[in-house]
Image (cartoon, rainbow, N blue to C red):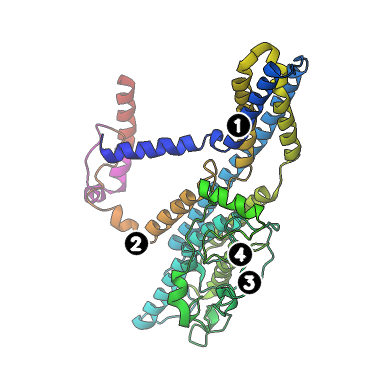
Amino acid sequence: MSVRTRAGRALLFLHHLWAIAIFRSWRILIFYTLWATAVCIVNYHVHRVALQPTLLTVLGTVLGFVISFRTTTSYDRYSEARKLWAQVIFASRMFARTVWFHVPSNAIGVKVDPGDKTLLDECQARTLLEKKTVINLLEAYAIAVKHYLRREDGIRYEDINPYVKFLPKYALPSSIPPQSCTMHHRRPKDGDEAEKGQPDLECSRPVHQQDSSLFSGTATLVSSHTHHLSENNSDRNIHNLLPAEIPPDRSWTGLFTRLWRKICHAEPLPQHQSKPWKKEQVDNVPLEISFYVSSYIAALEERNDRIHPRIEPPTMSLLHTSLSQLIEALTEMERIATTPAVYSKHLWLLTIIYCLVLPFQTLSTLGWLTIPGTVLASFMFFGFLVAGAEIQNPFGYDKNDLNLNDFVHIIRKELHSMTSRPTPNPSQWVFCNENNLIFPSCPNGEVVSPGEWLKRGSAGMYEAFGSHVENCGIHRKST
């Protein structure tokens, strides 16, 4: 085993170890360790405080059932979120495949004289550029959904900005409810760069203008700004883009810094100085992207009478269905992200009270073993509560949350691979000499090249097909 493989397995083990609930509830366990120790010291050295464990079993059983229900409910949300991301991947595959393979090479809607090679090449190039751009928007849609569900506003991120910086902006309301500023977001003060005239990336999107060229009837979008960013400051702003992921700082330094600033009533420090404060409502960038994907479908429908060959209705229906599945998945994930857990605070309060009273009821039976017993019981109860709270909203940065980047990478790799070459022509791969095993499942099948099959004709091919069924069946029975 190589050193790199062992190092990779060690990192994987540490990743799984860090996902254990004990690392999310260690503060609670330390408190109850100290509490149980104090109760034992008071009981044996000051005054007996032991209680009869009358309700210990009954209350513990009821509390366990309630916590189990809470965890099961959270896992249902987690599982549903995973299914919805699978739906996003499926719809992206279907839409991209339909566009790349079933939209004709000249779908601009301009009638071209077969002898005009220059115009034909321009129409095909425009069609290819449209197809590649709209397929890129599918990848941008998945990235935008990731940021939107994490309440990361705007498009000032390295992973999404190149895909959508040229799109004019819609003023859409958000379906994500207001949320207070987190530990790594802040509102800019007077004197900050945002107030000194630094171009706002959201406000500098281009506006709609109509192209007056030969292709003016094709609903193309051009803009007075070539880029989403201001041209005079484009290089500087590109370097100021935020990373694709900005997890909260959970280190000891970050913990004590936030605690100290909270005690001193100071404004929390941002994790990234270039990050704007988190808005109370997040712009619905995924829905904006879906508008432009829908505009592409509308343009194809409008041009269809001038496209040769025409795009068939089933193809158009499949494009609409795939886009509807993308929007449906976004809406359902919004529902998961915005639906609070019922009576979660009440359950936390009951668990806290139960674990506080637990040492008094176990003193007479366990003695000094009350301390580890209380810690173990607290770890069990609060571990499930913490696990349920963590996967309740599975779109964040917690170790047990869904790895949204993996889903985005799946879509990116597949779309890039699919668009890396022209649409395959069956005449090229069916009739190549390597296709010489027409019955690959049969070990005794003939090795015949496509040219030889063509010489036998259709009658000879049907005869070989029937013979294969009989011989292959006898071979399977004998084995």
Q: Position of residue 411 (x, y in %)?
A: 46, 54
Residue 330 seen in this snapshot: no
Q: Is residue 439 above or below residue 156?
A: above
- Residue 238: say if magenta: no
The tag earlier along the polypeptide, 4 or 3, is 3
Q: Earlier in the sequence, mark 3 or mark 1?
A: 1
Q: How crowded is mark 1: few (under 14 residues within 10 Å), some or many (20 or more)?
A: many
Name the residue type under label 4.
Answer: Trp
Circle 2: is it few (<14), some (14-19), or many (20+) Cα within 10 Å?
Answer: few
Magenta range is 443-464
Asked whether the beta carbons under mark 2 and mark 3 sit within 8 Å of each other, the answer is: no
Spatial CA span between label 4 and label 1 = 34 Å
Mark 2 or mark 3, earlier in chain: 3
* Label 3 CA crowd tier, 10 Å (few <14, some 14–19, many 20+): some
Tell me the chief SS of the magenta region. Answer: helix
Under mark 3, the amino acid is Tyr
Is 110 above or below relative to 149?
below
State yes or no: discs 4 and 3 in contact (Cβ < 8 Å).
no
Measured Cα–Cα span from mark 2 to mark 3? 34 Å
Between the residue at mark 4 and the residue at mark 2, the CA separation in whole angstroms equals 43 Å
Quarter of the image for the N terminus: give it: top left
| Residue that numbered label 1 is attached to | 29
Q: Distance between the residues labelled 4 and 3?
A: 21 Å
